[in-house]
Amino acid sequence: MANRKTKIALISVIVLSISLTFALFIGYRYFLKKPGKVISVIADGSTITIEKIHQTSSKNGVVEWNLDAGSATYSADKKEAFLKELSLTFFTKDNRKIFLTADNGILKTETSDIEISGRIIVKNDEYLLKTEKINYEHDKRIIFSSVPVEISGRSLNLVAGSMTIDLNSNKAELSGKVEGIIGDKISF
């Protein structure tokens, strides 16, 4: 009789272990497919740090940008992710790519706006831009800097006090003491 109770207890422990393992596996797969759910279950006032992150923003099935970072520290109170060693790829309406790298960034999780700082390089097929601070406004899809920028390309070298790039129209506007050299093989 005691032998039978031991067998039943052992079988119950095995079934419970298998069920728990299966539940953990399903939960892990669910959060793996929906990383935004992980952040939503973090309690207010909490902070979490994640190494090597990847985030994609899309609207109506169209990818607007991809973000990679060496690490991110998420603050539930501020609803911000503090990024280190970040790399962003913006996609324009005509399917061009604009690449940005920087030391630091702050992603506002409620608006998807990003404040970027520290050794910033922005480039596409034609131009290279360097600055120390840039912002991305997600709703308007604009990249702007209110600090000096340096822009170089095959036929130009410019310095400006500030700059705005409209990702919807693929137009850049430079302002604030714009100086530079424009070569003879440039088209507007």
Image (cartoon, rainbow, N blue to C red):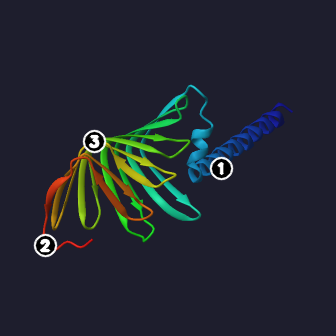
User: What amino acid type is highlighted by mark number 1?
Assistant: Ile
Label 2 near label 3: C-beta < 8 Å?
no
The image shows residue 143 at horizontal and vertical percentages of 38, 52
Mark drawn on residue 147: 3
Question: Tag 1's secondary structure?
Answer: helix
Distance, label 3 to label 2, CA atoms, is 28 Å
Mark drawn on residue 184: 2
In front of the other: label 2 or label 1?
A: 2
User: What amino acid type is highlighted by mark number 3?
Assistant: Val
Q: Determine crowd level at label 3: few under 14, some 14-19, many 20+ residues with C-alpha closer than 10 A.
A: some
The image quadrant where one finds the C terminus is bottom left
* Residue at image location 36% in from the left, 56% down from the top: 165
Distance, label 3 to label 1, CA atoms, is 48 Å
Reading the image, the residue beneath label 1 is 26
The image shows residue 77 at horizontal and vertical percentages of 55, 28
Q: Is residue 80 above or below residue 59?
A: above
* Residue at image location 24% in from the left, 54% down from the top: 129
